[in-house]
Image (tube, coloured by chain):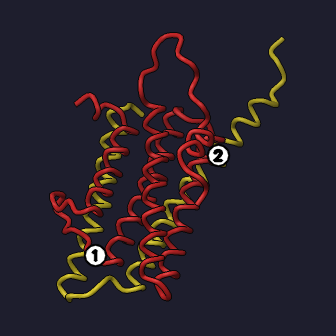
Chain colours: A red, B yellow
Amino acid sequence: MRYMRNKAGLLNLGVSMVLALLAGCASLGVQRPDNFGEKIEGAYTTVGLVRDTGLRLLQAGKIADQEAQVVQDRADALRAGIEAARDIRKVSEAGAESRLQAVLLTAQYITNCLDEREQPRPEGAEPLPTLAVCIQKQDPPL
Amino acid sequence: MSNSLLIAQLILDYSTSLSQLAALQAKARAENREPTDEELDKLGEGDDVKRARFQAAIDDARSRRISGSQRPPDM
């Protein structure tokens, strides 16, 4: 239950659940996506969750406007990746799948960084890197 | 807003998102087909709304920070 005590952790859990859903988990009351369109649906939902969490962290004073803008910009990149995957599919199914997987992986990286901001920090611990640095360290730009 | 309220809101949003996703999937599956481009576009439009709301909050926070930093120091 400790994991549930902070909202970023909850978002991380939520995104993980969406990813698990996309990977084949059918225990959420939503049937396992077995076609490209259903995976795209899940990706749109994930981007929305990233934006919602950014908004809540901003409103709660957990992140500053500059950090929130980073979240927004990365969510925009995810969205662009989804639209690109839809376009690529017109010429290449495998290419579209690959692009979509990259989008979902990046979404996971972003939520990892948001989650990190919610974890209690031990006394004397080094300050966290900025969100931009945190995300960049894990993932190259889309 | 308290953390518990924020978490409750997040759970609600997450549940709503999953419900919408489930409804779309159910509709498409009932008709034994993939979601149409129109249905996917609607999800995109929903994200546009979330984006606009988030950006407005960012702009508001930025304005408050800038106006606060321009205030003359207390004497």
- The mark nearer the N terminus, 2 or 1, is 1
Residue type marked 2: Asp
Which element carries disc 2, helix, strand or loop? Answer: helix
Q: Position of residue B54 (x, y in %)?
A: 55, 53
Q: Which residue is mark 2?
A: B60
Q: Residues within 10 Å of mark 2 (few under 14, many from 20)?
A: few
Pointers 2 and 1 in contact (C-beta within 8 Å): no
Q: Residue at x 49, y 47 (%)?
A: A110
Residue B49 lies, with reference to residue A140, above or below; the image says below
Q: Which residue is mark 1?
A: B24
Q: Residue at x 22, y 63 (%)?
A: A24
Q: Name the image quarter holding residue A130.
A: top right
> How many numbered discs sit on the rendered protein?
2
Q: Residue at x 18, y 58 (%)?
A: A28
Q: Is residue A26 left or right of residue B41?
A: left
Q: Is B36 in front, or is B6?
A: B36
Q: Chain of mark 1?
A: B
Residue type marked 1: Leu
Q: Name the image quarter holding residue A10.
A: top left
Picture quarter with the C terminus of chain A: bottom right
Residue B75 lies, with reference to residue A14, above or below; the image says above
Q: Name the image quarter holding residue A93.
A: bottom left
Q: CA distance from mark 2 to mark 1?
A: 34 Å
Q: Is residue B29 left or right of residue A52?
A: left
Which element carries disc 1, helix, strand or loop? Answer: helix
Q: Residues within 10 Å of mark 1 (few under 14, many from 20)?
A: many
Q: Is A45 in front, or is B1?
A: A45
Q: Position of residue B29 (x, y in %)?
A: 20, 82
Q: Is A96 in front, or is A12?
A: A96
Q: Nearer the viewer, mark 2 or mark 1?
A: 1
Residue B8 is marked as none
